[in-house]
Image (cartoon, helix red, strand yellow):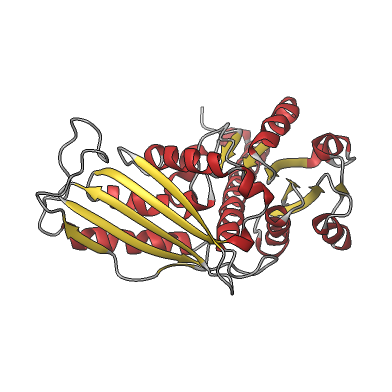
Amino acid sequence: MSRTKVAVIGSGNIGTDLMIKVMRTGEHLEMGAMVGIDPDSDGLARARRLGVPTTHEGVDGLIALPGFDDIDIVFDATSAKAHEHNAARLRPFGKLLVDLTPAALGPYVVPAVNLEQHLDATNVNMVTCGGQATIPVVAAIGGVAPVEYAEIVASIASKSAGPGTRANIDEFTETTSAAIVEVGGARRGKAIIVLNPAEPPLIMRDTVFALVRAPEPNAAEDIRRAVASMVASVAEYVPGYRLKQEVQVTAVPDDQPLETLVAPGADRPTHQVSVFLEVEGAAHYLPAYAGNLDIMTSAALRVGDRIAARRAAARAALRATDRHPQEATP
């Protein structure tokens, strides 16, 4: 079966790891180009050694490459501001853009939650590392009991936060908070990121704190089962994703003030849910502690593979119809 050619814009840590994932584990994808702006970057050097076409002239260099017309999907692993420029330049060419920056020009996509709803979008946004790690859990909890408030804390090794991550801290909190509501289904959302300078570097940890209305007697067990099922779904494409300890569901005391957290007029939550996660990277290019970067590239690969598979199936169906027009549905 023919594979879909892709380009990666951004020859830093995330882009290079994504390139290696495409080449090692992509089911329906193959590298068509690696794009950067630093001719001496390790990502471009590795791409050249692996036989991948490269350019250090950014998106304009990509458009000028001889094989550009054969590329269907472009992964953007640059920055929020750069993605706005890249998306504008690529728009006339009809490429699908998978955005790994917090720019959020297209719909938020978290593969385990809402990928199937956005397979026809032309620009999909991968939210943030914290969003990819925690929004599935918020959605799982919300499937059992309404989530009035969800707060996530993403703690990552300082060494795994490069210049792009640090430059986009504000966008991280804004994008993740919005996606907790839009994709996770919480009525209110808040995101916090912690850059941990500990040595040796610590593996990514994520905490989800949710306030829910769970009057049913079996709600606590139902929430635990839903979270465990969702964690297993995410682990299908992020093998290092796991629960760090049992999900905690506790009653909210009657005298605990919640007015600053829940929306005005909302019903008072009955329980708080605490979920503790760990994300270990696959160490394809990045260190194993950099789970924050690995979950982004793994999620993006999942999106690209699924969309490529859908397009391949559509082309196959069209060819079958052309060969047997009498069997086409009127």
Q: What is the number of callouts on the image?
A: 0
Q: Is residue 80 above or below residue 218?
A: above
Q: Nearer the viewer, residue 294 or 251?
A: 251
Q: Nearer the viewer, residue 28 or 105?
A: 105
Q: Nearer the viewer, residue 22 or 186?
A: 186
Q: Is residue 200 above or below residue 106?
A: below
Horizontal arrangement in the rendering, residue 304 relative to residue 114 (left or right): right
- Which quarter of the image is occupied by the N terminus? bottom right
Image point 37% across, 54% down: which residue? 137
Image point 29% across, 59% down: which residue? 274
Horizontal arrangement in the rendering, residue 267 relative to residue 181 (left or right): left
Query: Can you give x and y, in whole percent of width and height, for residue 326 in the image?
Result: 59, 33
Q: Is residue 177 above or below residue 92?
A: below
Give residue 105's quadrant in the image. Answer: top right
Give residue 67's quadrant in the image. Answer: top right
Query: Can you give x and y, in whole percent of width and height, for residue 308 in the image?
Result: 63, 47
The answer to whether residue 308 is seen in the rendering is no
Give residue 146's quadrant in the image. Answer: top left
Query: Can you give x and y, in whole percent of width and height, for residue 173 in the image?
Result: 48, 42
Query: Can you give x and y, in whole percent of width and height, for residue 304 in the image?
Result: 62, 48
The answer to whether residue 313 is seen in the rendering is yes
Image point 66% across, 59% down: which residue? 26
Q: Is residue 90 above or below residue 248?
A: above
Check the image and name the residue furthest to the bottom.
Answer: 200
